[in-house]
Image (cartoon, rainbow, N blue to C red):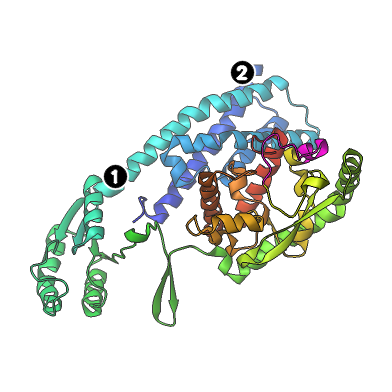
Amino acid sequence: MKNQPAPYAQIILRALSVGVELVTVFLTGVLAYWVRFKTFDIPQEYMAFFGIYTFAWVGISLFYEQYNKDRLLEISTYWKRFLPVLLMQALVVFAYLTLAKMDISRYVLFFTYAITLLLLIPVRFLMVRAYRSYHNMTYSIRKIVVVGAGESADHLYDFFKGKKAKVFRMLATPEVPMDSPEYHDYLWDQIDELEALCMEQGIKEIYFAMPYHYGDIIQHLDSFGADNFIYFRVISDFRAVNQRQVNVDFVDNVLVLSLKKEPLRLMSNRILKRGFDLVFSTFVLTFIFPIIYLIVGAAIKLDSKGPIFYKQLRTGREGKEILVYKFRSMSVTENSDEFKQATKNDSRITKVGAFLRKSSLDEFPQFINVFLGQMSVVGPRPHPLKLTEKYTPHINQYLYRHFITPGITGFAQVNGYRGETSDPEAMEKRVEYDSWYIENWNLLLDLRIVFLTVWNAIRGEENAY
Protein backbone atom coordinates (compact mmCIF):
# COMPACT_ATOMS: atom_id res chain seq x y z
CA MET A 1 0.00 0.00 0.00
CA LYS A 2 1.29 3.44 -0.87
CA ASN A 3 1.89 5.96 1.86
CA GLN A 4 -0.58 8.57 0.63
CA PRO A 5 -4.02 10.04 1.25
CA ALA A 6 -6.96 9.50 -1.06
CA PRO A 7 -6.48 10.77 -4.68
CA TYR A 8 -9.25 13.39 -4.41
CA ALA A 9 -7.54 14.82 -1.32
CA GLN A 10 -4.27 15.04 -3.23
CA ILE A 11 -6.00 16.97 -6.00
CA ILE A 12 -7.47 19.43 -3.50
CA LEU A 13 -4.12 19.88 -1.75
CA ARG A 14 -2.33 20.43 -5.05
CA ALA A 15 -4.94 22.99 -6.06
CA LEU A 16 -4.51 24.77 -2.71
CA SER A 17 -0.73 24.71 -3.13
CA VAL A 18 -1.01 26.22 -6.61
CA GLY A 19 -3.41 28.88 -5.28
CA VAL A 20 -1.10 29.78 -2.39
CA GLU A 21 1.88 30.22 -4.72
CA LEU A 22 -0.20 32.18 -7.24
CA VAL A 23 -1.11 34.70 -4.54
CA THR A 24 2.38 34.71 -3.00
CA VAL A 25 4.25 35.26 -6.26
CA PHE A 26 1.83 37.96 -7.45
CA LEU A 27 2.21 39.78 -4.12
CA THR A 28 5.99 39.80 -4.57
CA GLY A 29 5.52 42.03 -7.61
CA VAL A 30 3.17 44.35 -5.75
CA LEU A 31 5.60 44.60 -2.83
CA ALA A 32 8.52 45.17 -5.19
CA TYR A 33 6.67 48.09 -6.80
CA TRP A 34 5.97 49.57 -3.37
CA VAL A 35 9.63 49.20 -2.34
CA ARG A 36 10.70 51.15 -5.43
CA PHE A 37 7.96 53.79 -5.69
CA LYS A 38 6.37 53.80 -2.19
CA THR A 39 2.84 53.50 -3.62
CA PHE A 40 0.29 50.81 -4.41
CA ASP A 41 -1.13 52.84 -7.30
CA ILE A 42 0.29 50.43 -9.86
CA PRO A 43 0.06 51.19 -13.62
CA GLN A 44 -1.71 48.72 -15.89
CA GLU A 45 1.45 47.64 -17.72
CA TYR A 46 3.08 46.67 -14.41
CA MET A 47 -0.02 44.70 -13.38
CA ALA A 48 0.14 42.85 -16.72
CA PHE A 49 3.82 42.13 -16.12
CA PHE A 50 3.16 40.79 -12.61
CA GLY A 51 0.46 38.54 -14.06
CA ILE A 52 2.84 37.10 -16.67
CA TYR A 53 5.54 36.73 -14.02
CA THR A 54 3.17 34.84 -11.72
CA PHE A 55 1.63 32.49 -14.28
CA ALA A 56 5.06 31.74 -15.78
CA TRP A 57 6.31 30.73 -12.33
CA VAL A 58 3.35 28.51 -11.48
CA GLY A 59 3.10 27.05 -15.00
CA ILE A 60 6.75 26.02 -15.08
CA SER A 61 6.48 24.70 -11.51
CA LEU A 62 3.59 22.50 -12.67
CA PHE A 63 5.71 21.36 -15.61
CA TYR A 64 8.47 20.34 -13.18
CA GLU A 65 5.90 18.67 -10.86
CA GLN A 66 6.73 20.97 -7.94
CA TYR A 67 3.25 20.49 -6.45
CA ASN A 68 3.38 16.68 -6.39
CA LYS A 69 3.00 14.73 -3.15
CA ASP A 70 6.69 13.97 -2.65
CA ARG A 71 7.62 17.65 -2.98
CA LEU A 72 4.93 18.62 -0.48
CA LEU A 73 6.18 16.02 1.99
CA GLU A 74 9.95 16.52 1.59
CA ILE A 75 11.28 20.08 1.16
CA SER A 76 14.62 18.75 -0.14
CA THR A 77 12.99 17.27 -3.26
CA TYR A 78 11.42 20.68 -3.97
CA TRP A 79 14.76 22.52 -3.91
CA LYS A 80 16.36 20.04 -6.31
CA ARG A 81 14.29 21.51 -9.15
CA PHE A 82 14.03 25.05 -7.84
CA LEU A 83 16.96 26.38 -9.92
CA PRO A 84 15.68 24.97 -13.27
CA VAL A 85 12.24 26.47 -12.51
CA LEU A 86 13.83 29.84 -11.74
CA LEU A 87 15.94 29.83 -14.92
CA MET A 88 13.07 28.74 -17.17
CA GLN A 89 10.76 31.32 -15.63
CA ALA A 90 13.38 34.03 -16.11
CA LEU A 91 13.71 33.08 -19.80
CA VAL A 92 9.95 33.35 -20.27
CA VAL A 93 9.80 36.69 -18.42
CA PHE A 94 12.66 38.29 -20.34
CA ALA A 95 11.31 36.96 -23.65
CA TYR A 96 7.97 38.58 -22.81
CA LEU A 97 9.61 41.90 -21.90
CA THR A 98 11.58 41.85 -25.14
CA LEU A 99 8.70 40.92 -27.43
CA ALA A 100 6.22 43.25 -25.72
CA LYS A 101 8.85 46.03 -25.61
CA MET A 102 7.89 46.83 -22.04
CA ASP A 103 9.88 49.41 -20.11
CA ILE A 104 9.96 47.90 -16.62
CA SER A 105 12.12 49.44 -13.92
CA ARG A 106 15.23 47.35 -13.34
CA TYR A 107 14.87 47.97 -9.61
CA VAL A 108 11.31 46.60 -9.66
CA LEU A 109 12.53 43.54 -11.60
CA PHE A 110 15.37 42.96 -9.12
CA PHE A 111 13.16 43.43 -6.06
CA THR A 112 10.48 41.15 -7.54
CA TYR A 113 12.91 38.23 -7.82
CA ALA A 114 14.52 39.01 -4.45
CA ILE A 115 11.18 39.15 -2.60
CA THR A 116 9.99 36.02 -4.43
CA LEU A 117 12.93 34.08 -3.02
CA LEU A 118 12.45 35.55 0.46
CA LEU A 119 8.71 34.82 0.58
CA LEU A 120 8.62 31.41 -1.12
CA ILE A 121 11.03 29.82 1.35
CA PRO A 122 8.84 30.27 4.48
CA VAL A 123 5.63 29.73 2.47
CA ARG A 124 6.87 26.42 1.09
CA PHE A 125 7.99 25.31 4.58
CA LEU A 126 4.52 26.09 5.93
CA MET A 127 2.92 24.17 3.05
CA VAL A 128 5.12 21.14 3.81
CA ARG A 129 4.21 21.28 7.51
CA ALA A 130 0.51 21.59 6.70
CA TYR A 131 0.60 18.71 4.22
CA ARG A 132 2.49 16.47 6.65
CA SER A 133 -0.02 17.25 9.39
CA TYR A 134 -2.92 16.37 7.09
CA HIS A 135 -1.08 13.26 5.87
CA ASN A 136 -0.67 11.95 9.43
CA MET A 137 -4.19 12.97 10.41
CA THR A 138 -5.71 10.87 7.61
CA TYR A 139 -4.38 7.76 9.33
CA SER A 140 -5.16 8.72 12.93
CA ILE A 141 -8.89 9.01 12.20
CA ARG A 142 -9.15 5.68 10.34
CA LYS A 143 -10.70 2.53 11.82
CA ILE A 144 -9.36 -0.62 10.22
CA VAL A 145 -9.44 -4.38 10.66
CA VAL A 146 -6.75 -6.59 9.13
CA VAL A 147 -7.97 -10.16 8.61
CA GLY A 148 -5.54 -13.02 8.15
CA ALA A 149 -2.00 -14.23 8.69
CA GLY A 150 1.25 -13.91 6.78
CA GLU A 151 3.99 -11.33 6.24
CA SER A 152 1.86 -8.92 4.25
CA ALA A 153 -0.89 -8.85 6.89
CA ASP A 154 1.70 -8.43 9.65
CA HIS A 155 3.42 -5.60 7.78
CA LEU A 156 0.14 -3.80 7.07
CA TYR A 157 -0.99 -4.09 10.69
CA ASP A 158 2.33 -2.68 11.95
CA PHE A 159 2.19 0.12 9.39
CA PHE A 160 -1.28 1.29 10.43
CA LYS A 161 -0.34 0.92 14.08
CA GLY A 162 2.71 3.12 13.56
CA LYS A 163 0.50 5.76 11.92
CA LYS A 164 -1.72 5.90 15.04
CA ALA A 165 -4.71 4.42 13.23
CA LYS A 166 -7.28 2.48 15.26
CA VAL A 167 -6.52 -0.97 13.87
CA PHE A 168 -7.82 -4.42 14.87
CA ARG A 169 -6.49 -7.85 13.96
CA MET A 170 -8.44 -11.05 13.30
CA LEU A 171 -7.21 -14.57 12.49
CA ALA A 172 -3.55 -13.60 12.94
CA THR A 173 -2.94 -17.12 14.26
CA PRO A 174 -5.64 -19.38 12.81
CA GLU A 175 -6.64 -22.30 15.04
CA VAL A 176 -6.96 -24.50 11.96
CA PRO A 177 -3.99 -24.82 9.54
CA MET A 178 -4.57 -22.72 6.43
CA ASP A 179 -3.76 -25.64 4.10
CA SER A 180 -6.25 -28.03 5.75
CA PRO A 181 -9.62 -28.98 4.17
CA GLU A 182 -11.43 -27.70 7.28
CA TYR A 183 -10.03 -24.16 6.91
CA HIS A 184 -12.84 -22.96 4.61
CA ASP A 185 -15.50 -23.90 7.17
CA TYR A 186 -13.40 -22.37 9.92
CA LEU A 187 -13.37 -19.04 8.07
CA TRP A 188 -17.13 -19.07 7.67
CA ASP A 189 -17.48 -19.60 11.41
CA GLN A 190 -15.48 -16.41 12.04
CA ILE A 191 -17.53 -14.22 9.69
CA ASP A 192 -20.18 -13.38 12.28
CA GLU A 193 -17.50 -12.32 14.77
CA LEU A 194 -15.83 -10.14 12.12
CA GLU A 195 -19.09 -8.47 11.13
CA ALA A 196 -20.01 -7.84 14.77
CA LEU A 197 -16.61 -6.21 15.35
CA CYS A 198 -17.11 -3.95 12.35
CA MET A 199 -20.54 -2.77 13.53
CA GLU A 200 -19.50 -2.30 17.18
CA GLN A 201 -16.31 -0.37 16.43
CA GLY A 202 -17.52 1.57 13.39
CA ILE A 203 -14.88 -0.02 11.15
CA LYS A 204 -14.48 1.72 7.77
CA GLU A 205 -11.89 -0.53 6.09
CA ILE A 206 -11.35 -4.30 5.91
CA TYR A 207 -8.05 -5.70 4.59
CA PHE A 208 -8.43 -9.40 3.78
CA ALA A 209 -5.25 -11.53 3.59
CA MET A 210 -6.69 -15.01 3.08
CA PRO A 211 -6.39 -17.48 0.16
CA TYR A 212 -8.01 -16.07 -2.98
CA HIS A 213 -9.65 -19.35 -3.98
CA TYR A 214 -12.23 -18.77 -1.23
CA GLY A 215 -14.24 -16.65 -3.64
CA ASP A 216 -17.54 -17.15 -1.82
CA ILE A 217 -16.13 -15.61 1.38
CA ILE A 218 -14.56 -12.69 -0.53
CA GLN A 219 -17.86 -12.02 -2.32
CA HIS A 220 -19.78 -12.17 0.97
CA LEU A 221 -17.47 -9.69 2.73
CA ASP A 222 -17.48 -7.39 -0.29
CA SER A 223 -21.29 -7.32 -0.18
CA PHE A 224 -21.23 -6.79 3.58
CA GLY A 225 -18.89 -3.84 3.10
CA ALA A 226 -21.06 -2.33 0.37
CA ASP A 227 -24.19 -2.65 2.54
CA ASN A 228 -22.51 -1.02 5.53
CA PHE A 229 -20.32 1.61 3.84
CA ILE A 230 -17.10 -0.24 4.62
CA TYR A 231 -14.26 -0.36 2.10
CA PHE A 232 -13.22 -3.96 1.40
CA ARG A 233 -9.69 -4.65 0.14
CA VAL A 234 -7.98 -7.94 -0.76
CA ILE A 235 -4.24 -8.00 -0.01
CA SER A 236 -1.93 -9.16 -2.79
CA ASP A 237 1.50 -10.25 -1.61
CA PHE A 238 4.13 -8.83 -3.97
CA ARG A 239 6.76 -8.25 -1.30
CA ALA A 240 8.91 -11.05 -2.70
CA VAL A 241 9.30 -9.20 -6.01
CA ASN A 242 9.83 -5.82 -4.32
CA GLN A 243 7.07 -4.07 -6.26
CA ARG A 244 5.64 -0.74 -5.12
CA GLN A 245 2.74 -0.90 -7.54
CA VAL A 246 1.08 -3.14 -10.09
CA ASN A 247 -1.20 -2.55 -13.04
CA VAL A 248 -4.61 -4.17 -13.02
CA ASP A 249 -6.33 -5.27 -16.21
CA PHE A 250 -9.00 -7.73 -17.31
CA VAL A 251 -8.84 -10.28 -20.11
CA ASP A 252 -12.49 -11.18 -20.60
CA ASN A 253 -13.50 -11.60 -16.93
CA VAL A 254 -10.06 -12.76 -15.72
CA LEU A 255 -8.13 -10.39 -13.46
CA VAL A 256 -4.58 -9.86 -14.73
CA LEU A 257 -1.82 -8.10 -12.76
CA SER A 258 1.36 -6.80 -14.38
CA LEU A 259 4.37 -5.92 -12.25
CA LYS A 260 5.34 -2.94 -14.42
CA LYS A 261 3.54 0.05 -15.83
CA GLU A 262 3.76 0.02 -19.61
CA PRO A 263 2.42 3.33 -21.00
CA LEU A 264 4.04 2.72 -24.41
CA ARG A 265 2.16 -0.56 -24.71
CA LEU A 266 -0.82 1.56 -25.73
CA MET A 267 -0.99 2.28 -29.45
CA SER A 268 -2.17 5.85 -28.84
CA ASN A 269 0.96 6.61 -26.78
CA ARG A 270 3.26 5.02 -29.35
CA ILE A 271 1.65 7.11 -32.10
CA LEU A 272 2.04 10.25 -29.97
CA LYS A 273 5.72 9.56 -29.30
CA ARG A 274 6.45 8.68 -32.92
CA GLY A 275 4.61 11.80 -34.09
CA PHE A 276 6.78 13.94 -31.81
CA ASP A 277 9.91 12.20 -33.13
CA LEU A 278 8.92 12.80 -36.76
CA VAL A 279 8.09 16.47 -36.26
CA PHE A 280 11.21 17.12 -34.18
CA SER A 281 13.63 15.23 -36.45
CA THR A 282 12.14 16.73 -39.63
CA PHE A 283 12.58 20.24 -38.23
CA VAL A 284 16.18 19.55 -37.14
CA LEU A 285 17.19 17.83 -40.40
CA THR A 286 15.59 20.57 -42.51
CA PHE A 287 16.63 23.76 -40.72
CA ILE A 288 19.50 23.00 -38.32
CA PHE A 289 21.41 19.94 -39.47
CA PRO A 290 22.54 21.33 -42.89
CA ILE A 291 24.24 24.29 -41.16
CA ILE A 292 25.75 22.07 -38.44
CA TYR A 293 26.95 19.62 -41.10
CA LEU A 294 28.75 22.30 -43.13
CA ILE A 295 30.50 23.82 -40.10
CA VAL A 296 31.29 20.61 -38.23
CA GLY A 297 32.15 18.68 -41.41
CA ALA A 298 34.66 21.33 -42.46
CA ALA A 299 36.20 21.40 -38.95
CA ILE A 300 36.56 17.60 -38.89
CA LYS A 301 38.20 17.55 -42.33
CA LEU A 302 40.64 20.32 -41.40
CA ASP A 303 41.48 18.70 -38.07
CA SER A 304 42.21 15.12 -39.14
CA LYS A 305 42.06 12.72 -42.08
CA GLY A 306 39.03 10.53 -42.52
CA PRO A 307 35.25 10.62 -43.06
CA ILE A 308 32.91 13.12 -41.43
CA PHE A 309 30.57 10.43 -40.13
CA TYR A 310 31.35 7.50 -37.86
CA LYS A 311 28.99 4.51 -38.01
CA GLN A 312 28.65 1.82 -35.39
CA LEU A 313 26.36 -1.16 -34.81
CA ARG A 314 24.39 -0.78 -31.59
CA THR A 315 21.56 -2.54 -29.79
CA GLY A 316 18.13 -1.22 -30.75
CA ARG A 317 14.58 -1.99 -29.78
CA GLU A 318 13.97 -5.59 -28.71
CA GLY A 319 17.68 -6.35 -29.10
CA LYS A 320 17.80 -5.77 -32.87
CA GLU A 321 20.99 -4.32 -34.35
CA ILE A 322 20.88 -0.77 -35.73
CA LEU A 323 23.57 1.29 -37.49
CA VAL A 324 23.97 4.52 -35.53
CA TYR A 325 25.45 7.68 -37.08
CA LYS A 326 27.75 10.15 -35.30
CA PHE A 327 30.14 12.92 -36.27
CA ARG A 328 33.61 11.38 -36.13
CA SER A 329 35.43 12.50 -33.00
CA MET A 330 38.43 10.12 -33.05
CA SER A 331 41.33 9.57 -35.39
CA VAL A 332 40.65 7.06 -38.16
CA THR A 333 43.49 4.75 -37.15
CA GLU A 334 41.84 4.20 -33.75
CA ASN A 335 38.30 3.82 -35.05
CA SER A 336 38.67 0.10 -35.61
CA ASP A 337 35.96 -2.54 -35.39
CA GLU A 338 37.16 -3.48 -31.93
CA PHE A 339 35.03 -1.65 -29.38
CA LYS A 340 36.71 0.41 -26.70
CA GLN A 341 34.87 3.03 -24.67
CA ALA A 342 36.15 6.59 -24.66
CA THR A 343 37.78 7.59 -21.39
CA LYS A 344 38.80 10.91 -19.85
CA ASN A 345 41.80 12.47 -21.66
CA ASP A 346 41.57 9.70 -24.28
CA SER A 347 44.42 10.14 -26.78
CA ARG A 348 42.22 8.86 -29.60
CA ILE A 349 39.94 11.90 -29.44
CA THR A 350 40.84 14.72 -31.84
CA LYS A 351 40.80 18.41 -30.88
CA VAL A 352 37.56 19.02 -32.79
CA GLY A 353 36.23 15.71 -31.47
CA ALA A 354 36.77 16.83 -27.87
CA PHE A 355 34.59 19.87 -28.49
CA LEU A 356 31.94 17.83 -30.30
CA ARG A 357 31.71 15.32 -27.45
CA LYS A 358 31.70 18.03 -24.76
CA SER A 359 28.86 19.88 -26.49
CA SER A 360 27.05 16.66 -27.57
CA LEU A 361 27.17 17.86 -31.20
CA ASP A 362 28.67 14.50 -32.17
CA GLU A 363 25.23 12.95 -31.63
CA PHE A 364 23.46 15.26 -34.13
CA PRO A 365 23.52 12.81 -37.08
CA GLN A 366 21.37 10.45 -35.01
CA PHE A 367 18.37 12.56 -36.00
CA ILE A 368 18.69 10.58 -39.25
CA ASN A 369 18.14 7.42 -37.19
CA VAL A 370 15.16 9.10 -35.49
CA PHE A 371 13.61 10.05 -38.84
CA LEU A 372 14.05 6.46 -40.06
CA GLY A 373 12.32 5.12 -36.93
CA GLN A 374 15.40 3.31 -35.62
CA MET A 375 15.76 5.71 -32.69
CA SER A 376 13.67 8.20 -30.74
CA VAL A 377 14.54 11.72 -29.60
CA VAL A 378 14.27 10.51 -25.99
CA GLY A 379 14.82 6.98 -24.74
CA PRO A 380 17.49 4.68 -23.28
CA ARG A 381 20.80 5.27 -25.07
CA PRO A 382 21.65 2.49 -27.56
CA HIS A 383 24.78 0.70 -26.37
CA PRO A 384 27.45 -0.81 -28.64
CA LEU A 385 26.96 -4.54 -29.15
CA LYS A 386 30.02 -5.42 -27.07
CA LEU A 387 28.67 -3.46 -24.12
CA THR A 388 25.31 -5.23 -24.32
CA GLU A 389 27.09 -8.58 -24.49
CA LYS A 390 29.25 -7.64 -21.49
CA TYR A 391 26.51 -6.51 -19.09
CA THR A 392 23.50 -8.68 -20.01
CA PRO A 393 24.59 -11.69 -17.87
CA HIS A 394 25.58 -9.57 -14.86
CA ILE A 395 22.87 -6.88 -14.43
CA ASN A 396 19.36 -7.96 -13.55
CA GLN A 397 16.86 -7.14 -16.33
CA TYR A 398 19.54 -5.30 -18.30
CA LEU A 399 17.78 -6.01 -21.60
CA TYR A 400 14.55 -4.46 -20.30
CA ARG A 401 15.98 -1.06 -21.31
CA HIS A 402 15.72 -2.27 -24.93
CA PHE A 403 11.99 -2.84 -24.56
CA ILE A 404 11.39 0.49 -26.33
CA THR A 405 13.11 2.45 -29.10
CA PRO A 406 16.48 3.86 -27.95
CA GLY A 407 17.01 7.62 -27.86
CA ILE A 408 19.51 10.37 -28.62
CA THR A 409 19.18 11.46 -25.02
CA GLY A 410 17.55 9.84 -22.01
CA PHE A 411 16.48 10.10 -18.40
CA ALA A 412 19.73 8.48 -17.22
CA GLN A 413 21.82 11.00 -19.18
CA VAL A 414 20.17 14.10 -17.69
CA ASN A 415 20.64 12.58 -14.24
CA GLY A 416 24.41 12.35 -14.64
CA TYR A 417 24.82 8.86 -16.13
CA ARG A 418 26.21 9.60 -19.57
CA GLY A 419 29.56 8.84 -21.17
CA GLU A 420 31.84 6.08 -19.95
CA THR A 421 30.21 3.19 -18.07
CA SER A 422 33.14 0.94 -17.16
CA ASP A 423 31.93 0.92 -13.55
CA PRO A 424 29.25 -1.81 -13.12
CA GLU A 425 27.53 0.25 -10.40
CA ALA A 426 27.21 3.20 -12.78
CA MET A 427 25.71 0.90 -15.40
CA GLU A 428 23.24 -0.48 -12.85
CA LYS A 429 22.12 3.08 -12.06
CA ARG A 430 21.75 3.82 -15.77
CA VAL A 431 19.59 0.72 -16.19
CA GLU A 432 17.56 1.78 -13.13
CA TYR A 433 16.89 5.23 -14.60
CA ASP A 434 16.09 3.78 -18.03
CA SER A 435 13.62 1.33 -16.47
CA TRP A 436 11.95 4.16 -14.55
CA TYR A 437 11.58 6.11 -17.79
CA ILE A 438 9.95 3.17 -19.59
CA GLU A 439 7.43 2.74 -16.76
CA ASN A 440 6.66 6.46 -16.35
CA TRP A 441 6.77 7.76 -19.91
CA ASN A 442 4.66 10.74 -20.95
CA LEU A 443 5.17 13.48 -23.52
CA LEU A 444 5.84 16.16 -20.89
CA LEU A 445 8.63 13.99 -19.49
CA ASP A 446 10.19 13.83 -22.97
CA LEU A 447 10.00 17.62 -23.31
CA ARG A 448 11.60 18.08 -19.90
CA ILE A 449 14.45 15.70 -20.79
CA VAL A 450 15.05 17.57 -24.07
CA PHE A 451 15.25 20.88 -22.20
CA LEU A 452 17.60 19.46 -19.54
CA THR A 453 19.80 17.96 -22.27
CA VAL A 454 20.19 21.36 -23.95
CA TRP A 455 20.76 23.05 -20.61
CA ASN A 456 23.40 20.50 -19.58
CA ALA A 457 25.16 20.92 -22.94
CA ILE A 458 25.28 24.71 -22.43
CA ARG A 459 26.65 24.58 -18.89
CA GLY A 460 28.94 21.60 -19.61
CA GLU A 461 29.02 18.17 -18.00
CA GLU A 462 31.77 16.41 -16.11
CA ASN A 463 31.13 13.09 -17.88
CA ALA A 464 31.05 14.60 -21.38
CA TYR A 465 34.29 13.35 -22.97
* Percent position of residue 168, x then y: 16, 56
Amino acid on which disc 1 is placed: Met
Side of 252 relative to 25 (left or right) = left
* Percent position of residue 351, x then y: 81, 35
Side of 230 relative to 32 (left or right) = left
* Percent position of residue 5, x then y: 36, 51
Say which residue label 2 marks.
Answer: 35
> Does residue 164 appear in this view?
no
* Percent position of residue 463, x then y: 64, 38
Q: Work out whether 349 lies above or below 247.
A: above
> Does residue 395 appear in this view?
yes
Q: Magenta stretch: give its range.
A: 341-356
Instruction: Specify the quadrant of the image occupied by residue 358.
Output: top right
- Examine the structure image and report whether residue 30 is included in the region drawn in magenta: no
Say which residue label 1 marks.
Answer: 137
Whichever of callouts 2 and 1 sits on the residue coming sooner in the sequence is 2
Number of dots carrying numbers: 2
